[in-house]
Image (cartoon, rainbow, N blue to C red):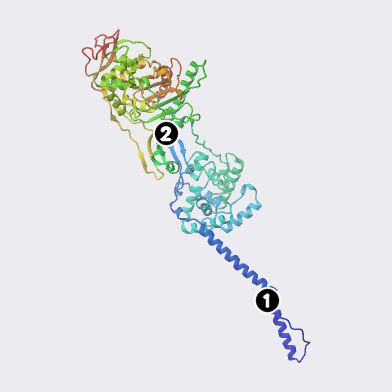
Amino acid sequence: MSLLIDQHCTVTRQTHNQAGDTPARRPSRPPRIWSQNQLIVLILVIGGLLTSSIAAVLALFISLQIPSIRTLSDYRPPLTTLVLDRKGAVVDRIFQENRYLVTLADLPELLPKAFLAAEDARFFQHGGVDAWSVLRALVNNLTSGNHTHQGGSTITQQVARSLLLTPEKTYSRKVKEAILAYRIDRAFDKKEILAIYLNQIYFGEGAYGVEAAARTYFGRSARELSLGEMAMLAGLPQAPSRYAPFRHFDLAKKRQAYVLNRMAEDGYITPTAARKAFNQPLLWGPPLARKPEHQYFLQQIRNLVQNKYGADLLATGGLVIRTSLDQEMQAVAVQAMRYGIAAWQARHQDDQSTGLPQAALVALEPRSGKIRALMGGVDFSGSQFDRAVQARRQPGSAFKPFIYAIALEQGMTPGTILLDEPLTLPGAKAGEVWQPENYSGEHYGPTTLRDGLIHSRNIVTIKMLQQVGIKPVVALARRLGIASPLTPTLSLALGTSEVSLLELTGAYAGFANGGKAIAPMFIDSITDAQDHVLEENQPNQTQALSPQAAFQVTHLMEKVILEGTGRQAQGLQSAAAGKTGTTDSNMDAWFVGYTPNLVTGVWMGFDRKKSLGRLETGGRAAAPVWRYFMGQAETALPKEEFVAPAGISIQPINLETGEPTEETTGNVSLEAFRQTVPEDKNGEADQ
């Protein structure tokens, strides 16, 4: 306009000159180079160029900071590891993020559509960023109630934000998010993006991905959800805390209604179906709670897998760990422990200054080695130290069966006589002497091998160890699974070398299993997220002791329960064998015993070694716990007897002489012999 006005004035002056008019002369002035308007235009142009340049530089700077989208090509999010019991029930979940990977094909058809309706109706039309959705969300948020707030971010933007960006709320992050969404949309198929979204998004309550959300809120797989439940889940990602149904049910229902209405508007369902789904009851599933009674067992599972495969794979690899845990037996183990501690407390109610003792229990199958129950202490919340696995304590007389097994293997019989008399032996240090005693402090003279074990006679056992040799006994213990150091001295006869309860119980399985050693086993199998088998454990039995000697030991330990130190373990429906163990000053009380189908070991004592109290022997403190547990556990097991192998005959002997007899009553006992009964006394009475 200024230029047009200037041009018009010049034309007018020229016309006047041509007409001969002589205008008055004005003082001359410098020519105007820039008008005011021209300066404004120039400033605007320069400002625009500067702004564009700055924007370009900023865009370039931001683009250089944007991460690569190539990681999405190999989408491997942290997945939840499941720990299953023997029947396949979930007993534990181990995760960095609670997530289960699913494909769109794994999900019901309406479930992805519920999320599209709730979060991104134009997902299949836009190019990663949807300006129309941003505008619509802005208008809706300004005009609607709080419960219908919408977000402007597309599903693609949410994927970019969740996987590739930090959660900070800044303009630069929004720019990065938009650029990434555009790139992702160009690089990936829409269904791929949707699948990543459904697996990645957070739903509250620690659940990542739609499958984890379904299991967390409804206790079922996503494929089993109703329409109303799908809509409830689809409403959560926008604000998981705000719409948390367990805390804000009314808001969650309003959000569910919004999702159902959107699904109807978008043509996924009919209005009638939407109303019906809204009014349909939601079947909430109980959240998986870690049962306190499982924690010692599960701690071993975590340790074993972590030590072998690493903590990262355990927490993020989506493993499925199938264990040997029997939940019913584990529950009984807890009850048995409480029973034993309460019984001890009742016996010592006049002296509570020492506090309560600890206890541990292990139960496993003798043929497979599968551990069905394990308690490493009275209360996991109070102490995570596992006394069944980590603790090493002296087993006392519970070690004696290994010595008797070697004696029987070498040809001794239940009727072999050894002299129970005062004994003086070299001590551990030069010049010292050792004078071992029986628990009672008495001596019993000529004693049969069977009485030596049944009544747990120390002198008889020491003499037996002198005869058979220490090395064969240690070798047998090793073959049966005891790995702890065993001191090669005669004190081994009294169980002075420390072992774990798990070791000792596993070793007893060899007696119950015909002399075949079996390794205790917590884990049946492990598979990874792709269903590849990482390990599959099968029972691996090795013959550690002859079947005949194993049966002879079992036959003798049956009598430990029937007439010896383990009488408080009586009362099972199946045949049972076992041995007590008590250490000096009653600091440790043991009972390890078995039926043909189950081996169980029990220990009781204080963590800081001190006496359990006067008369607190393995038979008094531990055997009743064993009896309580086995009495409940055997109800789910077949009733069986111990079967003698070939080469064993059951014959009567005179209990005083140990010699065979044809008598069937009186001072007579039926004993297990290898092939033939003895013709006369075995062993030497003067040793």
**Farthest-out residue, right:** 24
Answer with left or right where residue 25 lies relative to residue 486.
Answer: right
Question: Would residue 430 be seen by someone viewing this image from the given angle?
Answer: yes
Query: x and y percent of residue 348 in the render?
Result: 49, 16
Q: Which mark is residue 34?
A: 1
Query: x and y percent of residue 414 in the render?
Result: 27, 16
Question: Would residue 125 be seen by someone viewing this image from the given angle?
Answer: no
Query: x and y percent of residue 506 in the render?
Result: 35, 27
Quick one: label 1 or label 2, which is nearer the N terminus? 1
- Three-letter amino acid code of the residue under disc 1: Trp
Mark-to-mark CA distance, 1 and 2: 87 Å
Q: Which residue is mark 2?
A: 300
Disc 2 packing (10 Å; few <14; some 14–19; many ≥20): some
Q: Quadrant of the C terminus?
A: top left
The residue at 73%/85% (across/down) is 12
Q: Quadrant of the N terminus?
A: bottom right
